[in-house]
């Protein structure tokens, strides 16, 4: 989902919504074909990130723990088709608009037992290794209560 000016708003990713997924999984009925699910992409599209989880539970192969914050006043000025980050910001879990308690509860309800990987694109923490490490620790602390002790 790298966006250049020639690829915005969808980038090169065709698998952007449940209606497309249904077609993909119908046309390619393989148990080895699934989703790398990033709930922040739903926030970016102004969609509910929880709603597809039950229907596609058997196709969830990997979950990204990445949040997104939407600046409503700015969105009202530039609209959803404005180039990236003019009205939204990638955030670590807990710093954006996603209810991680609700999201993780839904994953537990559908018995998801695959990886949940923290994706750090949050510029709050900078771009150096130390900042990224701080971001991972903060995100881990936000998500830790949703995982059983080892």
Image (cartoon, grey):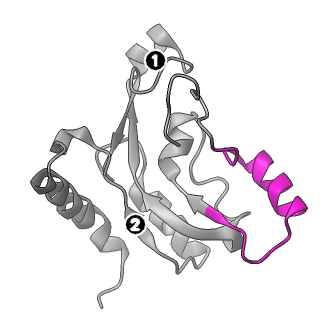
User: Which residue lies at the image location 76% right of the left edge and 54% below the top edge?
Assistant: 21
Seen in the image, is 9 located left or right of residue 29?
left
Q: Is residue 13 above or below residue 88?
A: below
Q: Label for residue 109? A: none
Indicate yes or no whether the magenta region holds residue 33: yes
User: Which residue lies at the image location 49% right of the left edge and 67% below the top edge?
Assistant: 105
In three-dimensional space, the C-alpha distance between marks 2 and 1, rounded to whole angstroms, equals: 28 Å
Q: Is residue 20 above or below residue 11?
A: below
User: Which residue lies at the image location 29% right of the left edge and 87% below the top edge?
Assistant: 149
Number of marks present in the image shown: 2
Where does the magenta region start and end?
Answer: 13-35
Crowding at mark 1 (Cα within 10 Å: few <14, some 14-19, many 20+): some
Quarter occupied by the C terminus: bottom left
Rendered location of residue 139, percent (x, y): 26, 59
Seen in the image, is 18 located left or right of residue 42?
right
Q: Is residue 35 above or below residue 91?
A: below
Q: Quick one: 65 or 25, which is closer to the camera?
A: 25
Q: Quick one: 17 or 101, which is closer to the camera?
A: 17
Q: Earlier in the sequence, mark 2 or mark 1?
A: 1
Q: Label for residue 117? A: 2
Rendered location of residue 103, percent (x, y): 48, 59
Locate residue 140: give its quadrant: bottom left
Q: Residue furthest bottom?
A: 150
Q: What is the secondary structure assignment of the residue under circle 2?
A: strand
Rendered location of residue 106, percent (x, y): 55, 66
Q: Quick one: 112 or 27, which is closer to the camera?
A: 27
Seen in the image, is 29 located left or right of residue 100?
right
Asked if disc 2 and disc 1 are in contact, CB closer than 8 Å, the reply is no
Q: Residue furthest right?
A: 27
Q: Mark 1 = which residue?
A: 75
User: Which residue lies at the image location 70% right of the left edge and 44% below the top edge?
Assistant: 14
Q: What is the secondary structure assignment of the residue under circle 1?
A: helix
């Amino acid at each position: 989902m790298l966006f250049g000016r020639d690829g915005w708003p969808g980038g090169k990713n065709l698998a952007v919504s449940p209606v497309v997924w249904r077609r993909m999984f119908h046309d390619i009925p393989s148990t080895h074909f699934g989703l790398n699910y990033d709930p922040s992409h739903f926030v970016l599209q102004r969609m509910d990130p929880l709603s597809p989880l039950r229907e596609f539970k058997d196709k969830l192969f990997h979950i990204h723990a990445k949040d997104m914050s939407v600046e409503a006043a700015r969105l009202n000025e530039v609209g959803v088709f404005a180039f990236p980050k003019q009205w939204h910001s990638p955030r670590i879990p807990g710093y954006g608009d996603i209810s991680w308690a609700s999201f993780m509860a839904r994953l537990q309800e559908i018995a998801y037992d695959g990886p949940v990987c923290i994706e750090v694109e949050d510029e709050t923490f900078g771009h150096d290794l130390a900042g990224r490490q701080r971001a991972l620790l903060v995100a881990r602390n936000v998500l830790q209560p949703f995982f059983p002790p080892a």
